[in-house]
Image (tube, grey):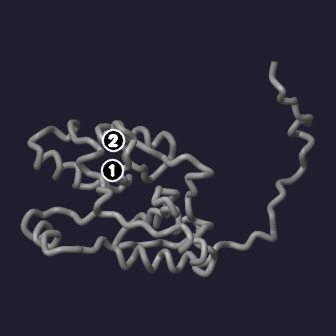
Amino acid sequence: MSSFKTLTSIPLSQVQTLRVNDVVEPLQLESPATFVMTDFSRRSPRIIELDTSVDEALRIMDKIHVRSKLVIDKNLNLVGIVNLSDLLSRKVLMAANLKGVKRTDVSVGDVMVKISELHAVRLSKIQCSNIGDVLATMRALGEQHLLVYDNDKNIRGAISAADIGRALQIPVDINATAHSFKDIFNVIHEHYELS
């Protein structure tokens, strides 16, 4: 038998008003960075498998109303991040063209931002930083996501530019940055998009 107890309730028709907390101040760039971090010790990361088709990923992300997911392989290793914007961009058609397949055969792994192209910041740094510091770091790196790692170098959390924008109620634009000559060459001659 269950050791859980039933809570006392009342009909909702007896509730008169919606109580809004007046004390909570809106977040600002000076607010602690932890306020916009998804902490994986408290909330499971949103994940998707590497070989999931782009169309299936779009359906899943639309159904659960998320804009990004961590990408894992069959062994549950983190291999990248995929954004809704990547799945809706010309990256999908470019990947299909490059592989010589139909658009429907393109997978999340073909359009994701690979883990080797991402950066992470130590949790202790995030804990003593503010949202503005994180945003400045993301802009300097040209990355939409900043992963957070703990003392054991395990991925502990993530911060996304989209989450910062929603929290601050401002538009947040992060322009992708070329990190090598190869990136520049691929954009100019191969018409690739920077991740």
Q: Is residue 97 above or below residue 22?
A: above
| Amino acid type indicated by mark 2 | Asp
On the picture, is 48 further left or further right than 65? left
| Amino acid type indicated by mark 1 | Val
Q: Is residue 71 above or below residue 183?
A: above
Density class for disc 1 (Cα within 10 Å; few <14, some 14-19, many ≥20) is some
Q: Which percent across, then down, holds residue 147?
A: 45, 62
Query: Looking at the image, is mark 2 or mark 1 earlier in the sequence?
Result: 2
Residue at (62, 51) in percent of width and height: 42
On the picture, is 115 further left or further right than 147? left
Q: Which percent across, then down, holds residue 168?
A: 58, 71
Residue at (36, 68) in percent of width and height: 143
Q: Secondary structure at mark 2?
A: loop
Q: Secondary structure at mark 1?
A: strand
> Can you tell which quarter of the image residue 90 is in?
bottom left
Q: Which residue is mark 1?
A: 79
What is the count of numbered marks? Answer: 2
On the picture, is 14 further left or further right than 20? right
Report if the CB atoms under discs 2 and 1 are less than 8 Å apart.
yes
Residue 153: image tag: none
- The quadrant the C terminus occupies is bottom left
Residue at (44, 66) in percent of width and height: 146
Q: Nearer the viewer, residue 163 or 131?
A: 131
Q: Which percent across, then down, holds residue 88?
A: 31, 51
Q: Which residue is mark 2?
A: 73
- The quadrant the N terminus occupies is top right
Q: Which percent across, then down, holds residue 180?
A: 18, 74
